[in-house]
Image: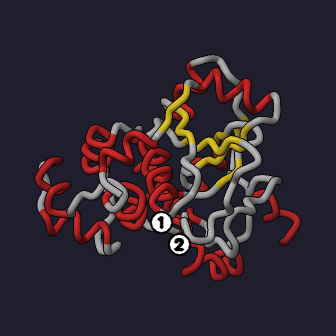
Amino acid sequence: MNEELEKTQLKEVRVEIVAKWLSSGQALLVDVRETSEFEQEHIPGAMLVPLSMLDPETFPRINIKKLVLHCAIGTRSAAAAKMLVKAGHIPPINMAGGIKAWREAGLSTELFDGTPTIPKHKPVLLADQTKASNASPGRVLLSEFIQPLGLSQQELACDIGISDDHIAEIISAERDLDADTAFRLARYFSTDEDFWMNLQMTYDLNRARTRYGDEIIRTITPQKNKNSAS
């Protein structure tokens, strides 16, 4: 399928229209952001299918309701829509502006304070999902941005002003994603800087929990329990 045909089949609608569809039961809303993003804030009733785990061949064929995709600002959901169209699905609808536009329109979202937890309504569109929060920032960069947008690592490195090796090492998880790179990626892909920094922080915490969690729990007594333990 050529690019022009993809463009003609990618329909976008405003958030206000999506909200009416959802309230009347006419639409199924799918959030293609990362699990960590979904856990922090999401649209009530949305189902989670991270773009990094989207398999067009196993994605259900939705024909009863309007299938609406959304992400943070509309870029990733547009890439997801094109992937589904290429696989022969009925063209889904992209929610213009993503959750950012939804929030700016005064529409409600569900917020999670403190430590993020798995949503009560477990994502069911894909079987045996690996938690996306275990993914390195480089994996997210590759699978959600570079590959869907048809970029090369060299092109991205040149466009944001860093070396090819720098990008390659981030993608292979040999280098952490620092604040400078987060600002460059955020500017280039029109995302928030916090999105990239939160990916690195969550990945680091998961690595530390896996490597040292049992030892820390075994050897460190919480301060509030010190007196009772002595």
| Crowd tier of the residue under label 2, counting other residues whose Cα lies within 10 Å: few below 14, some 14–19, many 20 or above | few
Report the front residue among 219 and 149. Answer: 149
Residue 126 location (% of width, % of height): 67, 67
Q: Is residue 107 left or right of residue 178?
A: right
Q: Amino acid at mark 1?
A: Asp
Is 75 positioned to the left or the right of 115 in the image?
left
- The one nearer the camera, 112 or 43, is 43
| Residue at mark 2 to residue at mark 1: CA–CA distance | 6 Å
Q: Residues within 10 Å of mark 1 (few under 14, many from 20)?
A: some
Residue denoted by label 1 = 204
Please provide percent x and percent y for residue 82.
44, 52
Tag 2 and tag 1, C-beta contact below 8 Å: yes
Circle 1: element type = helix
The quarter of the rendered structure image containing the N terminus is: bottom left
Query: In the picture shown, does residue 183 fall above or below 123?
Result: above
Q: Amino acid at mark 2?
A: Ala
Which residue does the image show at 69% across and 54% down from the upper left? 62
Q: Quadrant of the C terminus?
A: bottom right
Task: Name the residue: 71% across, 51% down.
Answer: 63
Residue 115 appears at what percent x and percent y?
69, 51
Is 35 on the left-hand or right-hand side of 45? Answer: left
Q: Nearer the viewer, residue 105 or 166?
A: 105
Is residue 168 something one can see in this rendering?
yes
From the viewer's perspective, is residue 31 above or below residue 165? above
Residue at mark 2: 208
- From the viewer's side, name the closer residue of 58 and 102: 58
Residue 113 seen from this side: no
Q: Residue drawn at (25%, 71%), measured in percent from left and top? A: 169
